[in-house]
Amino acid sequence: MPAKADVIKVVMVGSGNVAMQLAMLLNISGNKIIQVISRNKKTGRQLAKLCDCNFDSELKNVNTEADMCIIAVNDDSIAEVVSNMPLMKAAVVHTSGTIPMEVLKKKFKNCGVMYPLQSLTAHSGIFSELIFCVEASGKKVMDSITGLLQNINCRYVKLNSAKREKLHLAAVIVNNFPNHLYSLAYDFLKQNKISFQILQPLIENTALRIDSRNPKSLQTGPAVRGDLKTIKRHLQLLKNNTDIADVYKTMTKSIQKSRK
Amino acid sequence: MPAKADVIKVVMVGSGNVAMQLAMLLNISGNKIIQVISRNKKTGRQLAKLCDCNFDSELKNVNTEADMCIIAVNDDSIAEVVSNMPLMKAAVVHTSGTIPMEVLKKKFKNCGVMYPLQSLTAHSGIFSELIFCVEASGKKVMDSITGLLQNINCRYVKLNSAKREKLHLAAVIVNNFPNHLYSLAYDFLKQNKISFQILQPLIENTALRIDSRNPKSLQTGPAVRGDLKTIKRHLQLLKNNTDIADVYKTMTKSIQKSRK
């Protein structure tokens, strides 16, 4: 297995958002994607072209000269990919937050996980540090993963599968849910002909002020103040938006509970 | 009323978070707080000392040489403050997101609103632009408010009371609720002995990528993917955290609805 500074030859399985973003990072860093394998021939070929490497749609044709094979597919497809892959000398690594490493270990002696703790979409940039949660079957694979991440200037934390799964749940809570709240606010302001962009500095500040302290100390607003009059008025304003009202009620109740 | 570049003499009514942050900004900018009036003698005296001005606990003693009197008290106390204040030639301005300007207009000929669209707490810095929503009884007061805001390098948008109230509701949705979600994630990770700080880049990125597009296009995660297996597993992981589970269910349901 190559040392940290060496070029790592990677086979990328998948051609979705995570595969795409990871392949771009690897390409920039001087590592080498030597093959893209994907069921989706269109996006697979696109990614292979971007990486200047071969494309294949069959897992049985995986390039055995690879140092690492990164499975960056939907969680639901990982087991199937594993069962269709031939045995490999290379380290086989998946990128899922929720699937245990055990799924790989059953088949591959050298295996690991590198889960990027970001919401990777095709059209959104990454504005802040990319951290990976890593796990490996042994020291050699761990060195290989961390070497690769150092090559692409990314930080990592070592976490076992049980903790990674919990961190993934927390990531849903701090990314998916706030983003949906932004979306609800967007809809509400659009209905009322108010520019959503006015909220941008507030959205940024809410996130940027977060540090290692309990965010509870930063809680403001009617719920934590116990300002029932404003809460009642807000629910009146939402009388034609029952979905937003449901979210408002649940969040307000939860904030009020946490005051006790 | 003074022109934009002139020093504006301000009486600050209140000594809480908003009064404090606003007074600090005004002080730095070369405007002049000439008096602090507050029911809370302790924090009122502290603020007056910081502003190098007189303190009074009685509204009837308001300094009539002021150009502007800023009422920066809790929403619930504004009506009482108004009724206890003498009639004034100066512009009387409040800083509330929810209270209509009408409450001031009933008594004061020159009045207005400057609502800072930020979550201002005593211990949190402001990392991004401070925007004010402004409204005024007439052009002279509007010029005075916008002049003052230009002096402290803050942007403003003109919004009437009805729209301001709706924007305040949206601000609750994009600030109070996400901050509470950070707090729930903090609690959950603490229980499981995982560092909350690992989430910081994700939290930042989620906010910083927001622009004028509908945030819906940036939605990722199990709910929008329809990944019922992961959702079920997350609820298992939350079986001892019924409050977080309630929030998880409501948010997930709302995300799923918005896909349709």
Image (cartoon, coloured by chain):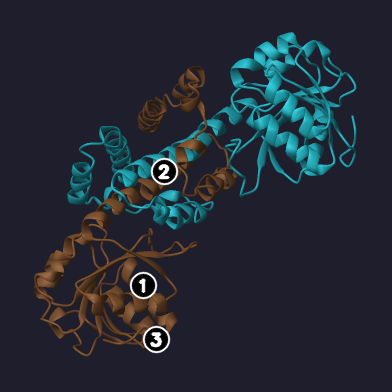
Chain colours: A brown, B cyan
Label 3 crowd bin: few (<14), some (14–19), many (20+), radius 10 Å: few
**Residue drawn at point x = 51 percent, y = 21 percent:** A230
Q: Amino acid at mark 2?
A: Tyr
Q: Secondary structure at mark 3?
A: loop
Q: Amino acid at mark 1?
A: Leu
Q: Earlier in the sequence, mark 3 or mark 1?
A: 3
Where does label 1 land, which residue?
A22
- Residue A119 on image: x %, y %: 38, 58
Label 1 crowd bin: few (<14), some (14–19), many (20+), radius 10 Å: some
**Residue drawn at point x = 10 percent, y = 81 percent:** A87
- Residue B34 on image: x %, y %: 85, 28
Indicate the quadrant where residue B60 lies: top right
Where does label 3 land, which residue?
A5
**Does the rendering let one see residue A191?**
no
Where does label 2 land, which residue?
B182
**Does the rendering let one see residue A151?**
yes
Q: Secondary structure at mark 2?
A: helix
